Amino acid sequence: MIRSNAMSCIATSTSLLHPQSIVASNLPQRLQNLQQARRSYSTTPALMEKTAFKAETRQLLDIVTNSIYTDSEVYVRELISNGSDSLEKLRHLKVSNDSSLKRSSGSEGVKITSEGGVVTIEDGGVGMTREELEVNLGTIARSGSREFVSEGKDADGDIIGKFGVGFYSAFMVGERVEVHSKSAREEGGGHTWKSDGGGEFEIVEGADEDLERGCRIKIFLKEDEKDSWGKERLGEVIKKYSNFVNFPITLNGEEVNTVEAVWSKMPSDVTEETHKEFYRFVSGAFDEPMYKLHYRADAPLDIKALLYVPKFHTEKYGMGRMEKGVSLYSRKVLIESKSDVMPEWLRFVKGVVDCEDLPLSISREKAQDSRLVAKLRQATTRRLVSELEKFKRKEGDKFRKEFWPEFGHFIKEGVCQDYQFQSQLSKLLHFESSKSPSGDLTTLEEYVSRMEASQKEIYYLVAPSREVAERSPYMEAFEGTKSEVLFVYSAIDDFVMSNLDKFEDRKLRSVEDKDLDLGGEGKEGEDGEESEGGGKGLSKEDAAEMCAWLTATLGGGKVSTVKVTGRLGSSPAIVTNHESGAMRRMMRMVDTQGGATGGLDAVGPQELEVNPEHPLIVGLKRIKGEEGREDMARELAEQIFDNAMVQAGIMDDPRSMVGRVNKIMEHIVKEKEE
């Protein structure tokens, strides 16, 4: 990489002309190891003093201005942050009645203009003396703001700058830079620092007369940058990075940062109307949020967060996967929009997280400590999940009717992806139930509270719709029992149940499972016990012989085992322990969208369970024993099996059995005619 190679070239070089160490703990290690440089002054009049950069320093400056930052627009952010720090220092000195203050007049904000190829950024802050200009601007990686804090000043929470390199980002777009400065601590005409970012800088007596106090930075744009930095572009960049600094920012006389950093206020001080306006700002929406979370914490990290749950999301309209909606700030300055401060499954949440404890890279374009970012993500996610639990508990109807239909899909995604919060998220899940009307939803907690003492497991059925679920042969085992079955309708629900596996130490059991145990509530005659129903069903011996015949007739490609079951009533047979029908439908859809031509893998051999009392099974036993009707018996057996596959939702193409159905109907018609 260019940056790495450049660093290697100067690994043993000296620092800068001023005898100050490069002391920035977050600088690259090789940069920290640079040695102090000697100053060499030319013989000049007292009004002007030129200082020559050494060759190594020019190389270092080139690295700072061209390699540290990835986007030239950050110079606006850096210089506004410097101006904000200068104003914050002045505010602190005024509040503390510092006797060193000499200038009382001056603007209380940051002014930006763009005219004639020159971008000017001015603050009315504390300003710099001649010595401070030389020290602060003549020594890369020396932060005046950091020194201000280290001197015991208590403005740390509002000071942005830490590294002492942000100023030099101006040379990314400027061919030369002037800093006109009038210090609040001294009277007089001020001083001007000038440099083209190359071999030298100079400090001259005097500054612009109309500058009352603070610094005015003039950036004389490079030829290829002059068309890029008009009012519109500057306004966009200001709003992107610096919209929430503590002081007003004007651009060509118009105030730009009119939106407050609402998250930095005490939650009790923010009105509902303010929340609505800020939500619209951060989300780009025109409605109101469904729910909000505004909190401050100082452990384990210093966090100020303002998060909103919108009323709808766009993924359901087929507009593609949404980008994350929470931005990461540090001391009100944007570090990363669409940040990883929230997990992927919470991408529907909008808002801001501001963390002062977050160590940043030298460019302030990203957080440096990935472990601390993970800790921040964990803390904010835990708080939001707890808040959603509170939402469900206190506003249950609103949660069921508004939140769950809109965002339930994302919660299910979290159950499958985020094992750390899976237990909490499982309490937010809502399902329809066999014991409640269509459209009514229940939770796993509510289900468990209604369970009979004899019931040890939570039962569920995956089906395309409630109508299909209620008519499913797998529900026949529950007829006349008190056991309740949850209905789930999508492929992700199947993922959820498989990943969750248990809830409050109770197994989640699909009713399609061969090991289904109703705790003594099941039908009589299970596992081949002979029915006492007047001899209408098969005897135990006939049933065993029938199972053997079906195994041989259907073959090992279709069935692995065939056995008698007592869990069925009106259905002749079912297949159990098969792959999920919902999952197979989803895979088929993905396969089609991907343009694959090979198709899904064939469904493997199934476990077939037959109802020995069903007229079809009894009739099949009779037909297969009649001379000349072997083909008819075989076709009936295959149709019974395919019907069971269709009801399980795992037959890929039901059209394959149409020919056989026609033949069976022909047999019936002929028999009627005869």
Image: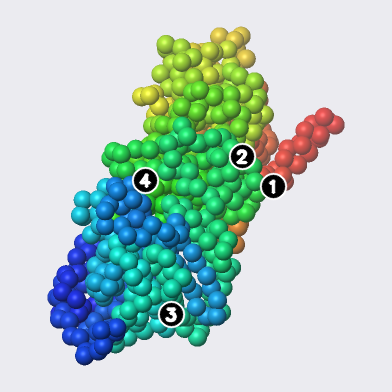
Identify the residue at image location x=31%, y=52%. Answer: 93
Quick one: SS at disc 2? Answer: loop
Check disc 2 and give the amino acid type: Glu
Check disc 3 and give the amino acid type: Gly
Identify the residue at image location x=38%, y=57%. Answer: 104
Q: Quadrant of residue 438?
A: top right
Q: Is residue 424 above or below residue 10?
A: above
- Residue at mark 1 to residue at mark 4: CA–CA distance: 51 Å
The mark lying in front, picked from 1 and 4, is: 4
- Say left or right for 489 vs 365: right
- Say left or right for 191 vs 562: left
What label does residue 288 carry, if any? 2
Q: Is residue 572 above or below residue 364?
A: above
Whether the residues at callouts 4 and 3 have beta carbons within 8 Å, the answer is: no
Q: Quadrant of residue 32?
A: bottom left
The mark lying in front, picked from 1 and 3, is: 3
Compare marks 2 and 1 and give the one earlier in the sequence.
Answer: 2
Quick one: SS at disc 3? Answer: strand
What label does residue 377 carry, if any? 4
